[in-house]
Image (spheres, rainbow, N blue to C red):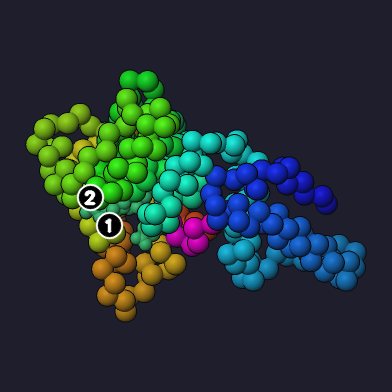
Amino acid sequence: MALEVAGSTPAGHPNPEVRAQSTGTAYVSAWLARRAALAVRRGPGGTPALDWRAMCDEHWDAVDAYTTGCLQPADPVLDAAIRDSASLPNIAVAPAQGQFLHLLARAVKARRILEIGTLGGYSAIWLGRALPDDGRLISLEISDEHAAVARRNIERAGLDNRVEVRVAPALDTLAQLKADHEAPFDLVFIDADKRNTPAYFAAAVDLAHIGSLIVVDNVVRQGKLIDLESDDPDAMGMRRLIEQMASERRITPAVIQTVGVKGWDGFAFALVIG
Ligand code: SAH
Ligand code: DHB
Ligand code: MG
């Protein structure tokens, strides 16, 4: 079987990590060749089952390079946002995840989005692009430096009329949004300091309406979620989140693990139902 990897797309990929290993396509080919060779050795009908346990980051990266290479057109604005975020921690969502957030925002026809944790505005651009012209995204960030980078990236994306970055500890801004009787948000993306995630989640439910979607990033963290011996406050924050979701009657929950260029992690989802 020939697996054609679309032309030069991984080499032109917006994520420098994917670009740097644009030979990711080579991983895919090598892996398919190995599988084909095994099948020949096994004889007729002998295509081996995929050895999932032997698959690791380089395969995940290769699959991301292939799928986003095919499904994400060249995007100078996102490229520039990543380039100009180089001085910030490299912890924005992966391109595939940004695209998924965009799809979710469109699926729920979000007109008002709340993001907690802006960084350089990469996820904000994906989400902001899902909004109608008169839509609104409020993104909360504690760092002046991150917010300055994000604002430039958001402006270059032509989204500064829709996307606002508010600089303060998110708990303070969330309290302010409540005090201001801010209209409810259709989508909330929680992606800031992990230890405060339970408090962000509670605030998100309060700032939502029936039908709103809450998405939480970094729930699994290489499996640290279930390391009960760890007293890492970030992992404990995510465990408390799961318990909170289990007992919160106003939402219906789901958790999905993810792999790809950002490693092994996961998202939690909550649909607000009451
Ligand atoms: N959503 C971004 C990534 C966010 S990284 C993207 O995918 O592109 C997490 C961000 O949360 C960092 O910029 C960090 O400065 C910010 N942050 C950390 N603690 C915070 C707090 N208490 N209030 C608001 N923002 C916070
Ligand atoms: C970290 C934060 C994130 O939001 C993320 O997606 C990955 C890592 C971090 O703080 O290490
Ligand atoms: Mg994150």
Q: Quadrant of residue 162?
A: top left
* Residue at 90 percent of width and 64 percent of height: 44
Q: Residues within 10 Å of mark 2 (few under 14, many from 20)?
A: many
Give the secondary structure at mark 1: loop
Confirm whether residue 100 shows in the render: no
What label sits on residue 193 in the rendered view? 1
Answer whether residue 230 is visible to the viewer in this image: yes
Q: Earlier in the sequence, mark 2 or mark 1?
A: 2
| Front-lying residue, 254 or 22 | 22
Question: Of 63 and 267, which appears nearest the observer?
Answer: 63
Query: Mark 2: which amino acid?
Result: Ile
Mark 2–mark 1 contact, CB under 8 Å?
Answer: yes
The residue identified by callout 2 is 142
Q: Is residue 51 placed above or below 29 in the rendered structure?
A: below
Asked whether residue 263 is drawn in magenta, I would say: yes
Q: Which residues are magenta?
A: 261-266
Which secondary structure type mostly characterizes the magenta part of the structure? loop
Residue 136 falls inside the magenta stretch: no
Q: CA distance from mark 2 to mark 1?
A: 10 Å
**What is the x, y in percent for residue 266?**
43, 56
Residue at horizontal 62%, vertical 44%? Answer: 12
Quarter the C terminus occupies: top left
